Image (tube, rainbow, N blue to C red):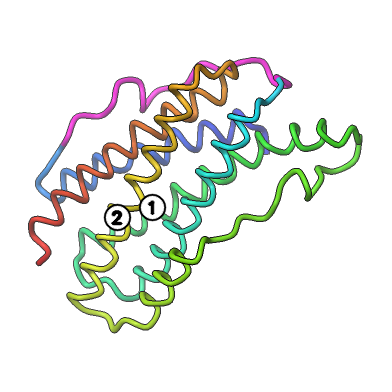
């Protein structure tokens, strides 16, 4: 799929949080520019080590958010939290596709091959031990109020980690404009999600 199409899909997917905020009685302001088309750089720009590290860290944390949200769809009882889990699945899936589409040309260039991207340049994402333990606990936890609190807390911690990843990358003075725009869009929506989760935390005890 064309990267511009994917980025358009990401921008569309990331505007669902305000709808969730309104249904939950809270409507934080949307970050500036997050619902419109993003300026695009020309394809084929070289990726720095910071670019690749940002992608890998974002995808790794996103994978945890995705897997925990898939579990939550079958166990969460709070309706606002269930809607959040559904939106999170959509967003993390789209963001992963965007990042992979940006990573593949860099991986091919790194191998000097005209063929497919190297698996060595694009290692498969793996959860760290603490994330695997958390996912296992969620799988073992019975549906109900305790699971809702467990999922909400996991999402809050994960989103705060994701926000730090975007902030570190954007503070590194990135030169890849397309990549920088994705990080800015992600950062704005992560902040929205943290605000939503903190609001829900006040009502889920």
Q: Percent from the top left, x then y, of residue 105?
A: 75, 33
Mark 1 neighbour density, 10 Å: few (under 14) some (14–19) many (20 or more): many
Magenta residues, start to end = 28-45
Q: Percent from the top left, x then y, of residue 164?
A: 38, 37
Q: Are marks 2 and 1 in contact (CB under 8 Å)?
A: yes
Which residue position holds label 1? 88
Secondary structure under the numbered disc 1 in the rendered image: helix
Say the numbered circle drawn on residue 84: 2
Quarter holding the C terminus is: bottom left
Q: In the figure, 71 relative to 34: above or below?
A: below
Q: Is residue 197 magenta?
A: no
Prevailing secondary structure of the magenta residues: loop
Q: Front-most of 59 and 43?
A: 59
Say the numbered circle drawn on residue 184: none
Q: CA distance from mark 2 to mark 1?
A: 6 Å
Q: Residue at point 16% right, 43% down?
A: 22
Q: Percent from the top left, x then y, of residue 124?
A: 67, 55
């Amino acid at each position: 799929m064309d990267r511009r199409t994917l980025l358009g899909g990401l921008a569309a997917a990331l505007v669902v949080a305000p709808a969730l905020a309104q249904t939950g009685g809270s409507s934080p302001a949307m970050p500036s520019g997050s619902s419109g088309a993003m300026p695009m750089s020309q394809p084929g720009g070289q990726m720095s080590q910071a670019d690749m590290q940002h992608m890998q860290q974002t995808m790794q944390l996103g994978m945890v958010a995705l897997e925990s949200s898939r579990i939550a769809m079958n166990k969460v009882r709070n309706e606002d939290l269930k809607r959040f889990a559904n939106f999170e699945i959509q967003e993390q899936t789209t963001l992963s596709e965007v990042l992979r589409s940006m990573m593949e040309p860099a991986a091919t260039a790194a191998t000097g091959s005209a063929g497919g991207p190297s698996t060595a340049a694009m290692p498969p994402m793996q959860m760290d031990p603490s994330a695997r333990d958390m996912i296992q606990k969620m799988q073992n936890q019975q549906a109900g109020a305790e699971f809702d609190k467990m999922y909400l807390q996991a999402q809050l911690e994960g989103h705060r980690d994701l926000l730090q990843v975007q902030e570190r990358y954007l503070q590194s003075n990135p030169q890849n404009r397309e990549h920088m725009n994705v990080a800015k869009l992600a950062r704005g929506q992560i902040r929205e999600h943290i605000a939503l989760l903190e609001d829900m935390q006040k009502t889920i005890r």
